Amino acid sequence: MALFSSEVREPPADAAETAIVLCNLGTPEAPTPTALRRYLAEFLSDPRVVELPRPLWWAILHGVVLRTRPAKSAAKYARIWREDGSPLKVWTERQALLLRGWLGERGHRVSVHYAMRYGAPSLPEVLDAAAAQGAARVLIVPAYPQYSCTTTASVFDAVAAWAGARRAIPELRFVSRYHDDAGYIAALARRVRDHWRENGRADHLLMSFHGVPERTRRLGDPYHDQCRETARLLAERLGLAADRYTVTFQSRFGGARWLQPYTEPTLVALARAGTRSVEVICPGFTSDCLETLDEIDREARHAFLQAGGTEFHYIPCLNDQPAWITALCDIVQRQIAGWPTSAPAAASAARADASAT
């Protein structure tokens, strides 16, 4: 069957007419060079991700990057790969499962799906499935608290492309950002306080966000400011003075100037200046992944300790923490306000009769 099928099918009679799609960045299907080459080709071909002239970037991508990077990335993925698969996919799938249950507990009759912008399950594939199941309304929830044209806007592009290939388009809503959402900030603070209770407090807290080219900021991308706002709100919630935490940016790619300060050089500078212990949290990631588990908890840890630091603590992402699922549920519930998501009266009556017997 074609991915964008125009075939009209009758949905199940009891189908939920509202669908929630939680979309994360993506992950390779396996920690192998072949799988990484396929994944990176899709990811790095997105003009939202790399904003270079296509002929120039195509020559670099296919002539250099896809010849050298897959094997190196595969080795890194192999270090973090779980028995049940990629950590990012495992956590995103679990978040969707828990979100469906918690929304159901609040009386919302909806279907909840997870998708990947790159890789599987693809966003068009998941949207096709939701439509085939009878969804007349769809809420898209990108897994990025801070808006960026490189991430959030790319999800919007994919949804628009999917809609452009269909005749019957469901009503669509889109969450663009939640960087300052009170529940999200509270969940982050809860994560840090739980770490403090179990491990004590380090000398310094470093908040590391994924980097983007500095050029995107000059062109009007609000990502940098939203990361700073998240950090400020989290520090306020934790009661941290300005000299007790630092905001940095990680995952620089290529030779261009990216948002600064960079994470690893900052950790090295802190160690050399006499900071003995640090704890690092990555507020921009809602699920642990390669960038947190390998880049931060392995590479950055090694750099800090080699520079003279004595204790490095990585604070895991929100993953399936109850405070985060509550916050996510609240975000979704606000966005679907006005949509009829209550169970039909007949179904409610049937449940009531069943309970009575």
Image (spheres, rainbow, N blue to C red):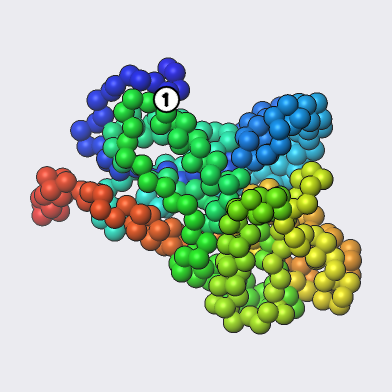
Counting from the top left corner in percent of width and height, residue 15 is at 26, 37
Residue at 65% x, 41% y: name it: 49
Q: In this view, does 97 lie to the left or right of 219?
A: left
Task: Indicate the secondary structure of the residue bearing disc 1.
Answer: loop
Q: Does 279 sit above or below residue 44?
A: below
Q: Does 235 sit above or below residue 300?
A: below
Tag count in the figure?
Answer: 1
Counting from the top left corner in percent of width and height, residue 187 is at 51, 67
Q: Does 72 sit above or below residue 355?
A: above
Q: Mark 1 points at which residue?
A: 165
Counting from the top left corner in percent of width and height, residue 231 is at 61, 69
Residue at 53% x, 47% y: name it: 152
Q: In which quarter of the image is residue 35?
A: top right
Counting from the top left corner in percent of width and height, residue 255 is at 82, 45
Residue furthest front as drawn:
219
Residue at 34% x, 57% y: name it: 333
Crowd band around label 1 with a 10 angstrom C-alpha radius: few (<14), some (14–19), many (20+): few
Location of the N terminus (image quadrant)? top left
Q: Can residue 96 be seen in this view?
A: no
Q: Which of 234 and 278 is in front in this view?
A: 234
Q: Can residue 352 be seen in this view?
A: yes
Residue at 89% x, 66% y: name it: 307
Residue type for callout 1? Ala
